[in-house]
Amino acid sequence: MGTKLIVSGSPHMHTRESTSRIMWLVALSLAPAGLSGIWIFGNQALWIILLAIASALITETGIQLITKRKVSVLDGSAFLTGLLLAYNLGPSVPFWIPIVGSFVAIALGKMVFGGLGQNIFNPALVGRVFLLASWPKYMTTFIQPLTYDTVTQATPLALLKEGKAIEHINYFNLFLGNHSGCIGEVSILALILGAAFLLLRGYISWHIPLSFIATTGIFTYLFAGKNLFTGDWVFHILSGGLVLGAFFMATDYVTSPLTRKGHIIFGVGCGLLTAVIRVWGGYPEGVSYAILMMNAAAPLIDRFTKNRVYGVK
Amino acid sequence: MKNIFQECVKGIIKENPTFVLALGLCPTLAVSISMINGLGMGAAATFVLVFSNIIISMIKGFVPNKIRIPCFIVVIATFVTITELLMKAYSPALNRALGIYVPLIVVNCMVLGRAEAFASKNNIWHSLFDGIGMGIGFTLALLLISGIRELAGAGKIFGLNIVKGFEPAAVIAMPSGALLVIGLLLGLFNVIKRRDK
């Protein structure tokens, strides 16, 4: 008998997947967007990203040490929160904005609920909304792309909200990222590269992003124009934080529903709220508020889309 | 006498109306923007609480059980009216700042809660000191919340600028900031209570 019988407990098949591996891969898939942001807005974008990440890591370590919990700062989730928060900031914010934002994101968005997996809301968006409500002056000042001087310029959506002409912005520039905006949201091309990686590897499913973006597109096509069915839906899809939010923040495992049906409802809700805020609301952009509101609804969606247990009526 | 002292002290930490009993949160959320408002609301509520507790423990013997709540409300409303008229006469600025929340002390669940849960079951002396303790606890809680909110949301304490070059987080001065601060303080109180056990 040459072969031995190996007896071991389950699970018998191992995979290399783990929460921490997924977190780092998502962070990796966000790299193209960050690099394009740094290329478009210069070194200050890099500093904002680094400060936001450092503050997120230090906050998580500090809180876990104070509350005597296991320090799990290297699992990548705090890194990802800091990164996403930085992508949601304009490139000209003062240096303390990313530090305060990441602190709020980790402390109020995640750790008060008990850490990773317990939070109700997407931590990075909690940080962003806190900053937006506290210091609107800094959070709504954006600079011209590719000039390397700090020349302020309104975002395409803000221009649209004020009823100003937006002729100098064409779809191609919007797609590449040659317009003012937040660091990580401007280049749709780079975001789609990262999102394609996540979709092909199966880390996110297409349900939330597609239903989110499609709903926003249809709704803005219907209502954003002067008459019905004249809205510039391509502009609405390509501008603002819609693509970043739909692929990288609405799909957060912790704060989105569990089932496929739930994903679709979640995405449609996010899309509707985004479009309503953009078309009729007071803010030019509504992606972060839309996702946060649907985060709050996620447990309810889960309750109504529960899968039938096999053998039970 | 020791017993009475305990009735007074329990309202400050052990049975703090805001952080432990979670009563009277509506005015707490609304007026805790500045410490002056917090102090004014605390004083007004303490006055009403002490005197309504005394009167209610006096009349508890002959108020029919079925209509006790309306009777308590009439007593409380009397003292609230006195407070409001006094405030209008002697500090109209504070009255303007507190606005509708002074008359709303009538339906403050902390005042009614102490009347129903304590004063209608205990004698005058105990009710008096319960009212004083609860009032002080409520005032201290309001001062703590409004202190944090005024400092973080406006960079001031009692209307004086404290830190130079500090850009206050406006969200803390908004209603959502009140919910955030109260939530965090409630959590902190729970942590402290759990540690004591």
Image: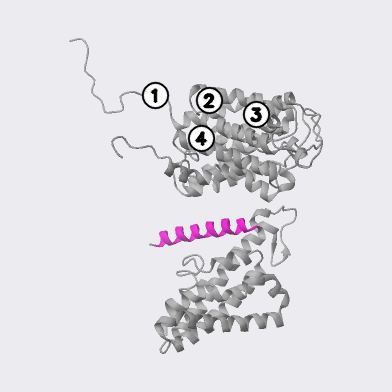
Q: Among all residues in the image, which is located at the extreme top?
A: A2
Reply yes or no: does residue A149 show up in magenta. Answer: no
- Residue A219 in which image quadrant: top right
What secondary structure is the magenta-colored segment mainly? helix
**Residue A34 shows which numbered tag?**
3
Q: Which residue occupies the foreground of this view, A94 or B98?
A: B98
The magenta segment = B174-196
Q: Specify whether residue A27 is in view.
A: yes
- Nearer the observer: mark 4 or 3; the answer is 4
- Residue B142 in which image quadrant: bottom right
**Residue A198 shows which numbered tag?**
2
Q: CA distance from mark 3 to mark 1?
A: 30 Å
**Residues marked 3 and 1 touching at CB (< 8 Å):** no
Q: Amino acid at mark 3?
A: Gly
Mark 3 or 2, nearer chain start? 3
Q: Residues within 10 Å of mark 1 (few under 14, many from 20)?
A: few
Q: Are marks 4 and 1 on the same chain?
A: yes
Mark 4 or 2, nearer chain start? 2
**Residue located beneath label 1 in the image:** A15
